[in-house]
Amino acid sequence: MAAAEHGKERENQGLRGEEGEEEMEEEERGDGSSEGTGQSSSDEEDEKENEAEIQRLEEQLSINAFDYNCHVDLIKLLRQEGELDRLRRARQKMSELFPLTEEIWLDWLKDEMKIAEDDSSREAVYELFEKAVKDYICPEIWLEYAQYSIGGMGEEGGIAKVRTIFDRALTAVGLHMTKGSTIWDAYREFENAILGTIQPLPGTIPSAEQQQMLNTQLERIHTLFRRQLGVPLLDMASTYAEYEEWSEEPIPETVNQNYMKAIKQVDKYKPYEEALLTAEMPKMAEYQAYIDFELKEGDPARIQIIFERALADNCLVPDLWARYTQYLDRQLKMKELVLGAHDRAVRNCPWTVGLWKSYILALERHCVDHSTITETFEKALNAGFIQATDYVEIWQSYLDYLRRRVDFTKDSSKEHEELRAAFVRALDYLKQEVEERFSESGDPTCSIMQNWARIEARNCNNMQKARELWDSIMTKGNSKFANMWLEYYNLERAHGDTQHCRKALHRAVQCTVDYPEHVCDVLLALERTEGSLEDWDAAVIKTETKLSRVNEQRAKAAVKQAILDRQEEEKAEQRKKTRAEKKAKKPKKAKPGDKRKAEDEEEDEEEWGEEAAEQPSKKHRREEQSEDNEAEEMETETGLFGRSTSFTSQARSKQKPPATKEQPRILHNPNKENITVFVSNLPYNLPDPEKQLKKVFSSCGEISQVRVVYTNKGTFRGYCYVEFTEEKGALDALKMDRQEMKGRPMFVSPCVDKNRNPEFKVFKYSTALEKHKLFVSGLPFSCTKEELEEMFKEHGTIKQIRLVTNRSGKPKGLAYVEYENEAQASQAVLKLDGTQIKDNTIKVAISNPPARKQQESQEAARSAMIPRQTYGARGKGRTQVALLPRSLHRQNTPSTTKTENGTPQTTEASSGAEGEPRKMSNADFARMLLQK
């Protein structure tokens, strides 16, 4: 009882101390009132501003309840204003949506403990503690919980309740290597306080009952010491010394053995603990290594505690939650523990569909009632996934669950009707909600409808409904794919009849585009085993007609491809010829940097030619770099088909270059590339480039020389080489890449000889999927980096913002925003996609640049299968009469082409039997006449 009074007194002293501080503050405020009303008026203004901000935050939360930062700001303001009721409601709303951090819980608990006076209010605090310990495994909260319970130990069963809380705390965090000892020490201190209350007074002899109570209490303390010494914790030596000092008897040998074993375990864990201690947040690599070690050791309790420690520091990492919940599902299988972890996982990372799917499976696995699973699914739909396919996956999981509830041996049941209604709702949801948000349903192959059709056919024997569903699937653009027809055919084959199988295959032969041969083979195989002679003849005619048409289209596409290949060869030959002519015209010695420039020009010409071949309709954007005649030469070389224009080249060859003053020539030294940077995209009208660039790069280090490159006319080409005396200067200069100079972004790249290192490319930005980086489009051209940062920083810590500009420095309306982690980026996508900036609706998505060249080549291959009629820029004219005499037409149609596997294939004009002379077309006769 004395310990109870001591705990109660300590709590009351804390309350009186806080009340005294508040009274002193009130007196100080009263004494300062004589200074005037200026401060009071300013306080009123602050209160009005805070109230306005509180109302704004509450309104914002009514629109988007999942705004985490908004919840935190609202709680902070309400606590500052002392609005206890509103503060309690705000905390409760946030705790319903998110697990609260240790700091938020401790602030909430301390506020509630201050005003808890009667037993009912203390029970409310106990309930709050129970919620707090479920969010994260936090030793500080467990310690606060146990110490608060000591204040109520004077009540009936109070001591037993305190011990229960301490035992639960030891189970939860007693294995924590660095903080677990605080719980053990507090528990022993509590039991020692109890021991002090039952000690007999000096000079008195205790009764038998008192002696038994005394022995029981001593045994409790002995047990706590022995249990603690068997657990690997830091600073175990001090605990052992304390036990030696406290115990009147020698320490048993078994305890010594357990202690030495725990010391050896500490030595094994120590490297991992030291790595965590020295690492910077979020310490994911260190935690992963620690988790792998514990999984090899195989102690479930220690595996659980290290997972919980890692999640406390990385609560927004979905992969970590997925790994933890998977371990609990497969190894521990304890209902309360497993479901609690799944619930915390989806509350921390609600945007991750995989966690919701695992949660629904876990609920079903542990036989949770149907209403709870349905409620969880509805929460998942409102979680705000970032991809349309995520909604398809969560619907599939829920529909699978509903299907497993149905007893298909009955003709009809409530569960069966609920399943059909869910299928209908799923299709409507994808069509309305998902398509409206993502401009796609996320289910192009109609996998949900296919699943429904299989259930109707196999489980319900309702082939009519299955055929209706498949008819709807085919009308959604899937009729051109062979695998879709074969899936339907297999369903008809298993549960339908031959008549519908034959009908489906005939339609498949007619509609299939990707693999028509396969569908034709299946149709012939069906008629070979089950069809009549009439059916066989019809199938043969159908398949032969289809394959003949397909082969004809492929032959035309092959001819077109051969023409394109020949045009590419002509372009390459023309480029070589033009370069040879340039070298013949300029036999002079190379001046500084000319070798590098010539290589750059050749690469620019090749790249431009490739872009022109891949994208003939795209306008070339290099006007700023062509003040001299080189731009005309480039256009003349590549042209439309890569042929040179004879008139311009002949006129230029007849012109003699004007006499210009020879520029001083300094040969480029490849041995100095590590101390040299290549600077390009500079303004052509830059006055005194050498002086300007020395001024710009002087902060990077001592400059040895600036090699400015000029044309033959003496005009600045827009690029140069900056050579430093030390390599550090060159490395610092590379950090100035894309810095603006005279209104244009200055490109700074390493100086590398591409003849010796042809694979070298300068592109410092990733072209792969980056989940922590956002791609923002639709921005107004007047939008600045500061405006973007102000808008995006509300949703996480921004590492970098990059506005995309063209070579002249003008904005393109695009930007990249990089966050610290993917969780912050996902939240920004949810909240900012589709918002307005200066009357522009922006689009925000995860950065995932497409593989452009590969996609374009695939599109070209697909389009080559279907011949198209090309028209002029103004469309199809009224007449298609050719104005060029037929005798002057030239056709470069090759006699042979190559198929996909490389074997030669003759065209229709040369498809005769071997040994027969090939028939000559009109184009062949015209070619012969022109050659003569």
Image (cartoon, grey):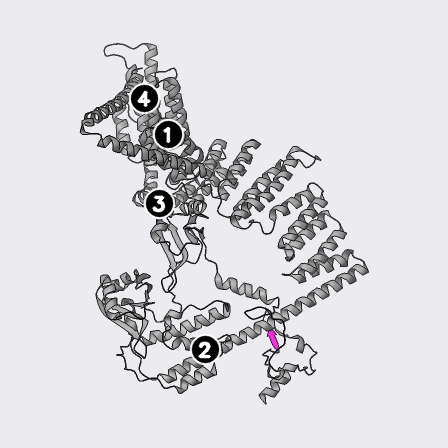
Kind of residue at disc 1: Leu
**Looking at this view, is 307 or 607 the one in front?**
607
SS at badge 3: loop
Q: Earlier in the sequence, mark 4 or mark 1?
A: 1
Dominant secondary-structure state across the stretch colored magenta:
loop
Measure how far apart labels 4 and 1 are at the Cα level: 37 Å
Q: Are marks 4 and 3 in contact (CB under 8 Å)?
A: no
Measure how far apart labels 2 and 1 are at the Cα level: 74 Å
- Percent position (x, y) of residue 499? 76, 52
Residue 260 in view in this figure: no
Kind of residue at disc 3: Lys
Q: Earlier in the sequence, mark 3 or mark 1?
A: 1
Q: Which residues are magenta?
A: 891-897
Q: Is residue 890 above or below residue 860?
A: below
- Percent position (x, y) of residue 791? 37, 47
Residue 599 sits in quarter: bottom left
Q: Are marks 4 and 2 in contact (CB under 8 Å)?
A: no
- Percent position (x, y) of residue 265? 35, 38
Measure how far apart labels 3 and 1 are at the Cα level: 33 Å
**Looking at this view, is 3 or 714 the one in front?**
714
Measure how far apart labels 4 and 3 are at the Cα level: 37 Å
Q: Which residue is mark 4?
A: 191
Q: Which residue is mark 3?
A: 283
- Percent position (x, y) of residue 548? 69, 68
| Farthest right residue in view | 533
Disc marking residue 637: 2
Give the number of the mark in front: 3 or 1.
1
